Image (spheres, rainbow, N blue to C red):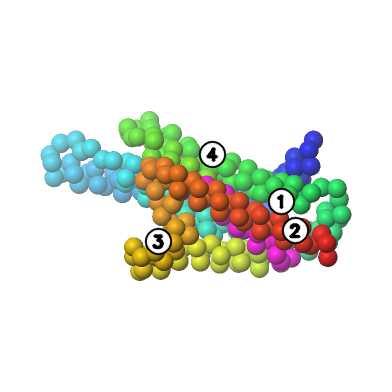
Amino acid sequence: MTPVQAIIAKELRGYFVSPIVYVVGAVFLLIFGFLSYLYVEFAGAQAIQLMQMQGGMAQINLNDLVFRNLFASMRFVLLIILPILTMRLFAEERKLRTFEFLMTSPIGAHEIVAGKFISALLIYLGLLGVTGLVPTILMLFSDFDWNPILTGYLGMALLGAFFLSVGLFASAITENQIVAAFVGFGTLLTFWLISGLGALLGDTPAGQIITYISFMSHYEHLVRGLIDTSDLVYFGSGLALMLFLTHRVVESTRWK
């Protein structure tokens, strides 16, 4: 077993013996299910209204009425719950005074960061996989295009990975889990709010730069079924940057 695999196994055991993963998972799945129900009900009401107006069977677009709205709504849910999922990864090590033992071990800082990040990502992807029951069940009752749904799930996976990397960085700079959660949430909220500033500045160079820095437009492209290289580069570079900063924080601690 490699050092990264050992850390992943350790962190996964830590997740499943604590209530965090169960609470976060339950909240995530309940909200996803509830929003799915609301948007399906809305689509049904739209279909009935069209039938009454047209006097026959109405064709509705579940991709637009259900899934696009669902994926768009889930970004705020992820912004809240994912910093909670990552808040313990380094902060708990510092609080329990096991961080020093980890730093004096022959495991590299990059392996520590990678192992902790991958463990949280596996938990998130597992929860995301469970939500696949919603389109699978709806497929039995209605026809829709799977391509926008798959790109929407790709968007949620990339957005979640980016959020987890921000949360991991927040956990690395403090020993208080609550502070780590709030720092992660505040950082992500800032990334969200600057999209409004970019909209105010319009097509100016500053506006374009600020809009690009925010994850909002990149995620919206994927939710609409559009896969653009610039969006993939954004999430990839953002993830790499946050993991690099986390690595620098951990590595600097080793030499104190």
| Secondary element at image label 4 | helix
* Earlier-in-chain disc, 4 versus 1: 1
Read off the residue under disc 2.
250
Read off the residue under disc 4.
129
Report the side of 215 relative to 256 (left or right).
left
* Earlier-in-chain disc, 3 versus 2: 3
Q: Select label 3 or label 2 by which is in front.
A: 3
Please report the bounds of the magenta region as a residue range.
158-177
Nearest the viewer among 211 and 220 is 211
* Earlier-in-chain disc, 1 versus 3: 1
Q: Residues within 10 Å of mark 2 (few under 14, many from 20)?
A: many
Q: Position of residue 102 (x, y in %)?
A: 83, 53
- Amino acid at circle 2: Val
Report the side of 49 relative to 106 (left or right).
left
Residue drawn where x is 52% and y is 50% of the image? 235
| Secondary element at image label 3 | helix
| Secondary element at image label 1 | helix
Q: Position of residue 137 (x, y in %)?
A: 42, 34
* Earlier-in-chain disc, 3 versus 4: 4
* Earlier-in-chain disc, 1 versus 2: 1
Question: Cα distance, mark 1 to mark 3?
Answer: 32 Å
Q: Select label 4 or label 1 by which is in front.
A: 1
Quarter of the image for residue 9 reads: top right
- Amino acid at circle 4: Gly
Read off the residue under disc 1.
113
Residue drawn where x is 47% and y is 42% of the image? 153
Residue drawn where x is 62% and y is 56% of the image? 242
Quarter of the image for residue 59 reads: top left
